[in-house]
Amino acid sequence: MRYLPLSDNDRADMLARIGVDSIDELFADIPEAVRLEELTTLPRRKTEMQVERQLSAMANKNVSAGSLPFFVGAGAYKHHVPATVDHLIQRSEFLTSYTPYQPEITQGTLQALFEFQTQVANLTGMEVANASMYDGSTGTAEAVLMAHRVTRKKKAVLSGGLHPQYREVVEGVSAKLPGASVAALPADPTGTEDILAQIDDETSCVVVQSPSFYGQLIDLKPIAEKAHKHKALLIAVFTEVVSLGLLESPGAQGADIVVGEGQSIGNPLTFGGPYVGLFATRQKYIRNMPGRVCGETTDAEGKRGFVLTLSTREQHIRRDKATSNICTNSGLCSLAFTIHMTLLGGKGLARLARINHMSAVALADALSAVEGVEVLNSAYFNEFTIRTPKNAHDVIEALAAKGVLGGVPVCRLDKSGGDIDNLIVVASTEVNTDEDRAAYAQALKEVLA
Amino acid sequence: MTMSHKGRPTRAGEAGSPMPHQTFTGNKALDMEEPLIFEIGHMDNCGVDLDEPMDFVPHLGNHMRSEPVELPALSEPETMRHYVRMSRNNYAIDSGLYPLGSCTMKHNPRLNEKMARLPGFADIHPLQPISTVPGAFELISELADWLMELTGTNAVAMSPKAGAHGEQCGMMSIKHAIAAKGEERSIVLVPESAHGTNPATAALVGYKVVSIPAREDGTVAVEAVIEKIEAHAGQVAALMLTNPNTCGLFEPDVIEIANAIHEAGGYFYCDGANFNAIVGKAKPGDLGIDAMHINLHKTFSTPHGGGGPGSGPVVLSDRLAPYAPLPFIRKNGDELEIVETTDQLKDGEQPFGRMTAFFGQMGMYVRALSYMQSHGSDGLKQASEDAVLNANYVRVGLQDLMTLPFGVKPCMHEVLFDDSFLNDTGVSTLDFAKAMIDEGYHPMTMYFPLVVSGAMLIEPTESESRASLDLFVATMRDLVMSAKAGEKDRFEGAPFLAPRRRLDETAAARKPILKWVAPEPTKVEPELA
């Protein structure tokens, strides 16, 4: 087997050196009744060429985003990632290193994390950021738990603009704790819900996504003010990090925790994962923050260096008293984010954001010109919601048959019915061309005719 | 003077020439000092060519940013050089033996990387129409089949994003199953030798943790489990046990322990971090487990990436299968039905909720399946055997000089030493480990598991050749002899030759600096102004 360096002679010699007659003597503690001879039901080894052939055949059955006009967003976005990014993250030294427990020989990973944390903090307008979460959805659930620790209250208020699957993750994780409750508002495509009325003295946190799941931009300031009046935290969520290049940062609007999906910068779609959760907060809350954190220090010769720090919050020290059970982060995805962000800089990100916004504006114009189609959002970034006269699921399937992937029917994720069944969340980014948009409008016209 | 096994001097200043001078740049030949991007980047530059949109007529309401994002950029060549230079300060499995016990630092085949980057996997969206991604579900389903077959179970929850996330998923399934029976239980039993994630997960899910002491041979006695079950009669929801355990030993009472917890109405959660030792040798399902996460980034070789991403599918017993979270794939003959929302559920399906948006770590699934197909059933079994063989080879190479806390006996895929061999040498476990760095090795796992004093947990994995193991053993022997000979200066303050000397972790934690801040402009002295 090409991955195994030992030869049969090696094995025999080594067994002799160990002083046993057969390899099975080393497995003697496994009760005899359950010992396996062979896994007869599974196929045997394959050459590199055979594996490549088999997996390529599976991959070829999928329609890839780059092969047709593609407008699917709703929490994951198709962007162009510079070739430099993928080359660098495949360097052995980054790819095949472990969590940097030995800082003297992992300064590469640690310095990149320190750069990442600074980028995330500056982007979100917050004081500190951690070294990444699994993704935006799990990060949001962790943010709610953190708010419960900080406020010593246990009621979370969730905006109806929060991604439905993020809501499910929050409900699954935090509502299961003794005394905890979640008040989730109904779907709010236009950003007109009265969330302020939901905030009271019992409230630990208010979770608001902007741009919302439906693309609507939300003014966080009044929500932050009301939350703070009731000693609750505002958790600001985003799923499209590119928007921060153009939109007022959540930190500047008074958010206490900012959490979101960082996939758009540096990371491919990959069917939903691995992604990278961004997590930032105020300095005063750092000891309640989940996840790994990298900090600056000096070595014995006074040189600057970086280490994982604040580990007294973590599971390997605190065990059942830890702030979270997280051990793994999204190291390599955060590195991809950092490298792409380094190529862009603040200026490049702002330009990329403007291109995205204008791409969406052009699409909104093209689609709203189709008879019966209505764009619902008054203010949006690179994504918005349309209402069509037909069932959204059927429209999307019919568009796919015409070679256009036209967005996400809201009813795939939200089964509350009614008007929801006719809504489609549509995204347009820098990868979409005028021809793509024209093809979408034409196909939609035919489907609705 | 300390010599390498080839007789070369190994320490600075002993090469027969004077200590090299302090260089102007601070670099030491290939060992480069690299500033932060915030110190070398440009606010007015960009490493990506983007055309400004022709007309900018925003539909942003009053949500426009008031201040620009304060982040510097580097051009493409500068970016390349910056990160390449930084990468060279990292130890990696591709550059040397990485004996971190419990972490399974094995070879990461590049075929897996290539497969994960096929556009049919990397460039597909989790919410594009299901009819346009049949190959994605076929891949997930085939990987699930492998995992179920290897573990002897009939269900697997694929979506958890890492090992600890898998633990959470398993424990939530258990909590839900207990609630479905109309019961309430408050306690989870966790052995002292467990990973920290086990008690942290139990607490996260809302349980109180009761610790089970290890017996003298490093394993858990069924009597100790029964004692706790009886002390908390009717309250024990589950036992979380790592098997093979963190001392590198297979739990000989595991079947009796499973029976005991089941008889008490509880569930057996198995931490599968060490599954790599027994793949193809035994099926955890046959041992009576109810849930076990599988770290695809350990056992099935997806790269660790400096701390992630991981992937932690959880196999479930028939008793827990109905409670597996959304989304899942329902097999209907050859047809795959994708269940994403509760309205799609059939009788008996009672998912406890959802662990994450979308379907989990697809990129890791592709890599893991590529690894499994390459190995095949025969290769996977061989890999387990070689991992155990290599660990035992290291054990017999070192057991006369280092100390085995539980006596001389075979280990599984990792060998645990304690630090009593360092008694009276004045060398601490930490110093000893840091001296390994100067020899070109990443240290083993230290001070874990907590059940032995000064634990040193060595996991060589199946990826090491015999020659590599021989050199490692010889190096370790040389270090031990040196410690015992009182050569303390080789250890105190080590490493001496790494890109950084010992870092001050206390200062880092006391006054945390978690991001770069522009230095205050230096004050101009009045007489110079």
Image (tube, coloured by chain):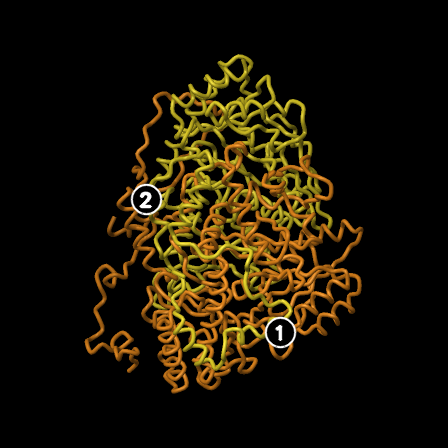
Relative vertical location of residue A32 with respect to residue B200 in this rendering, above or below? below
The image's mark for residue A84 is 2
Residue B295 got which mark?
A: none
Q: Around disc 1, counting alpha carbons within 10 Å, would you say few (fewer than 14), some (14 to 19), or many (20 or more)?
A: many
What chain is colored yellow? A
Work out which quarter of the rendered image holds the N terminus of chain B and state it.
bottom left
Front-most of B30 and B287? B287
What colour do you see for chain B? Answer: orange
Instruction: Tell whether B443 sits left or right of B404.
Output: left
Residue B393, percent across and down? 44, 76
Q: CA distance from mark 1 to mark 2?
A: 49 Å
Q: Tell me residue B224's x, y (percent).
A: 71, 73
Name the residue located 44 percent from the left edge and 69 percent from the top edge. B460
Q: Is residue A280 in view? A: no
How many tags in the picture? Answer: 2
Can residue B124 be seen?
A: yes
Point out the frontmost of discs 1 and 2.
1
**Label 1–label 2 contact, CB within 8 A:** no
**For the residue labelled by badge 1, is the local secondary structure a helix, a strand or a loop?**
loop
Q: Residue at x 28, y 61 (%)?
A: B31
Q: Label 2 neighbourhood size at 10 Å, few (<14), some (14-19), many (20+)?
A: some
Residue A142 sits above or below residue B52 on the image:
below
Specify the quadrant of the image occupied by residue B490.
bottom left
- Chain ID of residue with mark 1: B
Pick the residue in front: A414 or A125. Answer: A414
- Residue kind at label 1, given as amino acid type: Thr
The residue under label 1 is: B219
**Marks 1/2 same chain:** no
